[in-house]
Image (cartoon, helix red, strand yellow):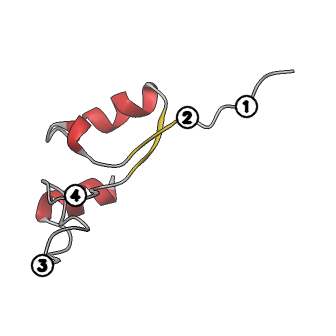
Amino acid sequence: MRARTCGTHLEDCAPLDGDLADVGMLAGLGVRSLVPTYNHANRARSGCLDTHDEGLTSWGMIWWRR
C-alpha cells in the first residue's frame, strides 16, 4: 500500500522570482498550491496587511491564468 502525500503549499509567489516558467518546475518539486501573496504586496497582488487592496497586477493576471 502506498502512502498518500498532499504535497507542498506555498503562501507567496516569491519562489517564482518573477519567472512564470518556474511554475512547472515547482510543480515537479511537489508544490500543489501557490497563493499569490500573503501579508504584503508583491509582484502578483496586494497583501492582507496592505492598507489599499489593488487586486491582481498584470503579472498576477498572467500567473493566475497559468
Rendered image quadrant of residue 57: bottom left
Q: Position of residue 28 (x, y in %)?
A: 44, 26
Amino acid residing under circle 3: His
* Whether label 2 touches label 4, CB < 8 Å: no
Q: Is residue 60 left or right of residue 52?
A: right
- Depicted 46 relative to depicted 32: above or below: below
Q: Is residue 35 left or right of residue 5?
A: left
**What residue is disc 2 on?**
7
Which mark is first along the chain, 2 or 3?
2
- Depicted 61 relative to depicted 42: above or below: below
Q: What numbered label is drawn on residue 52?
A: 3
Which mark is first along the chain, 4 or 3?
3
Rendered image quadrant of residue 20: top left
Amino acid residing under circle 2: Gly
**What residue is disc 1 on?**
4
Q: Position of residue 55 (x, y in %)?
A: 20, 74
Residue depicted at x 80% and y 22%:
2
Task: Label 1, secondary structure: give it.
Answer: loop
Residue depicted at x 12% and y 78%:
52
Between the residue at mark 2 and the residue at mark 1, the CA separation in whole angstroms equals 9 Å
Say which quadrant the N terminus sits in. top right
Residue nearest the observer in this picture, 50 or 10: 50
* Whether label 3 touches label 2, CB < 8 Å: no
Which mark is first along the chain, 1 or 4?
1
- Depicted 9 relative to depicted 46: above or below: above
Amino acid residing under circle 1: Arg
Q: What numbered label is drawn on residue 62?
A: 4
Amino acid residing under circle 4: Ile
Q: Position of residue 62 (x, y in %)?
A: 22, 57
Between the residue at mark 2 and the residue at mark 4, the CA separation in whole angstroms equals 24 Å
Residue depicted at x 62% and y 37%:
6
Q: Residues within 10 Å of mark 2 (few under 14, many from 20)?
A: few
